Amino acid sequence: MEDHDLMAPAYVYMVRCEGGQLYTGWTTDPAARLHAHKTGQGARATRAFHAVSMAYLEPCADKPAALRREAALKKLPKAEKEALCAAWAGRMQPRLSMATRADAAEILRLYNWYVLHRTATYQITPSTLEEYEAWVDRTLECAPLLLARDGAGKLLGYACAHPWHEREAFRWDVESTIYCAPEARGMGVAEKL
């Protein structure tokens, strides 16, 4: 096992299948793993019972911690698994609010994750807090900037509309953007936003 495998963020999860069955596993990319299960490329059990949705997701410190937690979850009775899923669903229900300048640091952390780890943005160098405070101010001058938070107040994602082009003829055109936290992708947050 490589050293970087031990340090990568890991998650333990339960996927709900068509007949109500729960499949438990671990991953470093919840959205990609859910997609694999839903498209028949996941585990044999989710291919047989047709995975439908993420029912539970728990961050772990690293792969060994996720493997230990996965083993513990698999030993739980169905009623306890269902209770965990119900509590998680309640926490993960997005609560929408309008952003303020004070939210810039959280929005920046989420955006910079995409700069560093994905190709959703063509930006290569992470933005600074000063840049994002100014961006929040500019955005709110002309359009809404919505936040989605879980029940504990953790940022799940944000959506904004911003000018599409600086030329005067485009002053009524906007481009919409939605970014979801890595662990919230595929959970319906973007749809709510």
Image (spheres, grey):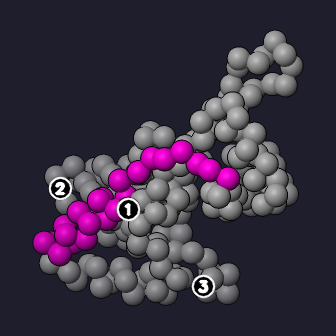
Secondary structure mostly taken by the magenta-highlighted segment of the chain = helix
The answer to which of marks 3 and 1 sits earlier in the sequence is: 3
Q: CA distance from mark 2 to mark 3?
A: 33 Å
Q: Give the secondary structure at mark 1.
A: loop
Q: Nearer the viewer, residue 181 or 144?
A: 144
* Residue ID at (13%, 72%): 79
Residue 80: say if magenta.
yes
The answer to which of marks 2 and 3 sits earlier in the sequence is: 3
Q: Residues within 10 Å of mark 3 (few under 14, many from 20)?
A: some
Q: Give the secondary structure at mark 3.
A: helix
Q: CA distance from mark 3 to mark 1?
A: 29 Å
Residue 27 picture location, percent across and down:
48, 69
Which residue has dot 3 on it? Answer: 6
Magenta residues, start to end:
78-101
Residue 125: say if magenta.
no
Residue 136 picture location, percent across and down:
71, 46
* Residue ID at (81%, 12%): 169
Can residue 32 be seen from the camera position used here? no
| Proximity of marks 2 and 1: CB atoms separated by less than 8 Å | no
Which residue has dot 2 on it? Answer: 20
Which residue has dot 1 on it? Answer: 151
Q: Give the secondary structure at mark 2.
A: loop
| Residue 136 to residue 31: above or below | above
* Residue ID at (42%, 55%): 34
Mark 1 residue type: Gly
Can residue 89 be seen from the camera position used here? yes
Residue 105 picture location, percent across and down:
68, 62
Instruction: Answer with left or right where residue 104 lies relative to residue 185.
Output: right
* Residue ID at (86%, 19%): 167
